[in-house]
Image: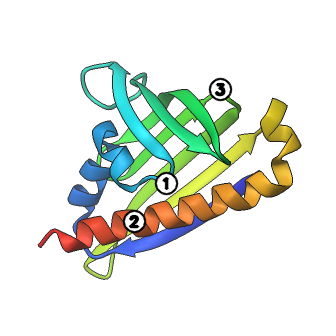
Amino acid sequence: MNFEHSVVINRPVEQVFTFTVTPANMPLWFVGAQEATQIEGTTMGVGAKVRAVGSLLGKRIETITTCTGYEANRALAYEMTQPFSQTMHYTFEAANGGTRLTIRAVAEPGGFFKLAMPVMAGAVRRNAETSLNNLKDILESQA
């Protein structure tokens, strides 16, 4: 399962990047996220680990993600192996006085999620699109 989605947020790159990469902000904008806490590393960067609790397709999931790429105000990448293998790449680019944020994901569902793949692919894509729109709304409402 692969997908990509972009949104332009009318805020400076630095503001969008900082808000997006702060784990405590994740439940504010990421669909299904209920909590997120950095559990390894004192700052976000390669090797930092984040524990997140949420739900997908009505199933409670707990994940540990590891930051695999970090370039301040430009890019963030992470991977997780449970409940299925997934890599996520976020890129931040200046665009029309704001920020173009693009998310790219590659996932290899297993177990329950593999069986639910036809439904899950659409749900994950919609969640990502809605999440980026939530992020846009939150950041643009901060005058």
First-in-chain label (2 vs 1): 1
| Residue type at tag 1 | Val
Q: Quadrant of residue 13?
A: bottom left
According to the picture, the residue beneath numbered tag 2 turns out to be: 134
Front-lying residue, 15 or 34: 34
Pointer 2 with pointer 1, Cβ within 8 A: yes
Front-lying residue, 67 or 140: 140
Q: Residue furthest bottom?
A: 96
According to the picture, the residue beneath numbered tag 3 turns out to be: 82
Judge from the rendering whether residue 60 lies leftward or rightward of residue 99; answer left or right.
Answer: right
Residue at mark 2 to residue at mark 3: CA–CA distance: 25 Å
Query: Which quadrant holds the C terminus?
Result: bottom left
Judge from the rendering whether residue 128 lies leftward or rightward of residue 131; answer left or right.
Answer: right
Residue at mark 2 to residue at mark 1: CA–CA distance: 8 Å
Q: Residues within 10 Å of mark 3 (few under 14, many from 20)?
A: some
Judge from the rendering whether residue 22 lies leftward or rightward of residue 63; answer left or right.
Answer: left
Q: Residue furthest front?
A: 58
Residue 31: mark? 1
First-in-chain label (1 vs 3): 1
Dot 2: element? helix
Q: Is residue 66 above or below residue 28?
A: above
Residue at mark 1 to residue at mark 3: CA–CA distance: 18 Å
| Residue type at tag 3 | Gln
Q: Nearer the viewer, mark 1 or mark 3?
A: 1
Q: Residue at x 33, y 38 (%)?
A: 23
Q: Residues within 10 Å of mark 1 (few under 14, many from 20)?
A: many
First-in-chain label (2 vs 3): 3
Q: Residues within 10 Å of mark 2 (few under 14, many from 20)?
A: some
- On the image, the x and y values in percent for residue 141 come to 21, 73
